Image: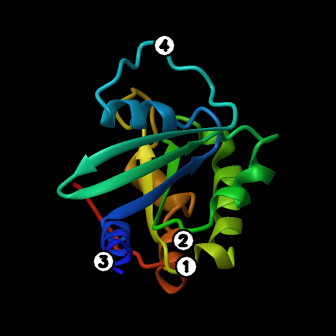
Amino acid sequence: MLSILRKARLKDKEMRILMLGLDNAGKTTIVKRIMNEDVTTVSPTLGFIIKTIDFQGYKLNIWDVGGQKTLRSYWKNYFEKTDTLVWVVDATDRLRVDDCRDELSGLLLEERLTGASLLIFLNKTDVEGCMTEDEVHKVNLSIFLSFAFSNFNSQRLHSS
C-alpha cells in the first residue's frame, strides 16, 4: 500500500508538456535550449522526441512533436494526460498565420485537452523583420487567448 501511495505522490510531481506548432516554428530548438543542447544542427522532427528535465522538484516530460502537414493528423495520439500545451508560433512566417490560427482553433476544441494549461509561444522575435506585437494583434492571434481561457486552464502572460 505504501508503494502505491509513493507512486501516486511521485505522479503528482510529474508533468507532461506537449509542444505543438507548424513545421519550422522552432519547437525542437526551444526544447534543445531548455536542455542546454547544441542547436546548430536542428533537423525537422519526424514523429516525436521526449526530453525529461527536473525543475524545482518536478519531473517535466517535454513531448516535441513534428509539425509537418502530413504529421498533424497524428497529433491527437499525444493528447492523453497532457498537463500543458505549448503552441509555438513562428513570428517570421506571415504567410502561414491563417494555417497556424486554424490548427490551434482545432486543438482548442479537443475534449482530451480540456483542463490542460495553454501557452502560446511567439518564437523568432529576435529575427529582423519578424511580426511586431501590433501585427500579431491585427492578425487575431490574440483571439486564441480569449477562447483558450474558457476551455483551458490558462493565464495570459505579457512582456513589454
Whether pointer 2 and pointer 4 mark residues with C-beta atoms closer than 8 Å, the reply is no
The span from disc 2 to disc 4 (Cα, nearest Å) is 34 Å
Image point (59%, 73%), residue name: 113
Q: Nearer the viewer, residue 130 or 49?
A: 49
**Residue 124 makes an appearance in the image:** no
Task: Identify the residue shown where x is 32% and y is 44%.
Answer: 53
Would you place residue 62 above or below residue 143 in this image?
above
Mark 4, residue position? 41
Classify residue 154 by image quadrant: bottom left
Q: Is residue 122 rendered to the left or right of residue 20?
A: left
- For label 2, the crowd category at 10 Å Cα-Cα, with few meaning under 14, some 14 to 19 and many 20 or more, is few
Who is closer to the viewer here, 28 or 144?
A: 28
Number of the label disc, if any, that sits on residue 147: 1
**Mark 2 or mark 4: whose residue is earlier in sequence:** 4
Q: Quadrant of the C terminus?
A: bottom left
Tell me where residue 130 appears, x and y as whole percent. 45, 35
Residue that carries the numbered disc 3 in the rendered image: 2
Using the image, determine if residue 26 lies above or below residue 43: below
Q: Earlier in the sequence, mark 3 or mark 2?
A: 3
Left or right placement of residue 10 versus residue 18 in this view: left
